[in-house]
Image (cartoon, rainbow, N blue to C red):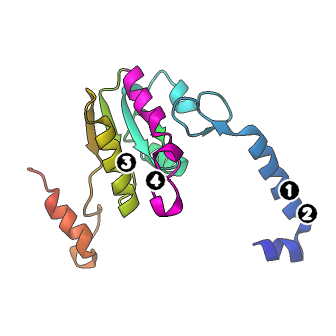
């Protein structure tokens, strides 16, 4: 893209650069949930229609948007801005986990849903948060894993199939 813009559309490149500069100057983090926002409180945190006692923890603002687009969750969020990755120098302090703990302590949160990615780092992050909250009077749950809707068993990897059998439920 950079080569194309430099070769054929320098004005377009300037417009993109200006838009990025403007965005960098306007966008901050929501003081409650830590996602990107142009205001102190993002639209989700400012909405009186949300369930204030259920908190969904996600890794990125993009994950928050994906959950929002599904329209299956009406609670509040906390965005970690990443996942634990000691090899990359990302520990609990870089993910604002102290803010998450304070949020759970200060607000009347009844459930924390761990919706980190189903990667090794996401699983480690979810387990760390679970341990962080284990002595608090809050229910901690994890999003389900397994066979996707419309998925065919013959095309699933062994890990997904194994998890689907481990997490099976009564019908």
Query: Does the magenta-highlighted stretch encompass residue 91?
Result: yes
Left/right of residue 82 with respect to residue 23 in the rendered view: left
- Could you say which quadrant of the image residue 168 lies in? bottom left
Judged by depth in the image, the label closer to the viewer, 4 or 3, is: 4
Nearer to us in this view, 25 or 88: 88
List x then y, in percent, for residue 104.
Answer: 38, 28
Circle count: 4
| Disc 3 to disc 1, C-alpha distance | 36 Å
The disc, 4 or 2, on the residue closer to the chain's N-terminal end is 2
List x then y, in percent, for residue 132.
Answer: 33, 39
Judged by depth in the image, the label closer to the viewer, 4 or 1, is: 4
Q: Is residue 55 above or below residue 47?
A: below
| Disc 4 to disc 3, C-alpha distance | 11 Å
SS assignment for the magenta stretch, majority: helix
| Disc 4 to disc 1, C-alpha distance | 33 Å
Q: Which mark is residue 15?
A: 1
The disc, 2 or 3, on the residue closer to the chain's N-terminal end is 2
Disc 2 element = helix
Q: Decide if residue 122 is in sight here.
A: yes
| Disc 2 to disc 1, C-alpha distance | 6 Å
The disc, 3 or 1, on the residue closer to the chain's N-terminal end is 1
The residue segment tinted magenta is: 81-107
The disc, 4 or 1, on the residue closer to the chain's N-terminal end is 1
Judged by depth in the image, the label closer to the viewer, 2 or 3, is: 3
Judged by depth in the image, the label closer to the viewer, 3 or 1, is: 3
Disc 1 element = helix
């Amino acid at each position: 893209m950079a080569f194309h813009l430099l070769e054929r559309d320098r004005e377009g490149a300037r417009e993109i650069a200006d838009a990025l500069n403007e965005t960098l100057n306007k966008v901050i983090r929501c003081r409650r949930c830590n996602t990107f926002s142009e205001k102190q409180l993002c639209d989700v945190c400012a909405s009186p229609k949300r369930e204030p006692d259920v908190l969904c923890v996600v890794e990125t603002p993009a994950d928050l948007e994906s959950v929002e687009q599904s329209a299956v969750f009406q609670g509040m969020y906390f965005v970690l801005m990443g996942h634990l990755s000691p090899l990359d120098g990302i520990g609990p302090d870089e993910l604002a986990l102290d803010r998450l703990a304070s949020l759970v302590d200060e607000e009347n949160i009844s459930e924390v849903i761990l919706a980190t990615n189903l990667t090794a780092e996401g699983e480690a992050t979810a387990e760390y948060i679970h341990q962080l909250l284990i002595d608090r009077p809050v229910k901690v749950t994890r999003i389900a894993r397994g066979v996707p809707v419309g998925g065919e068993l013959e095309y699933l990897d062994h890990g997904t199939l194994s998890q689907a059998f481990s997490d099976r439920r009564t019908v």
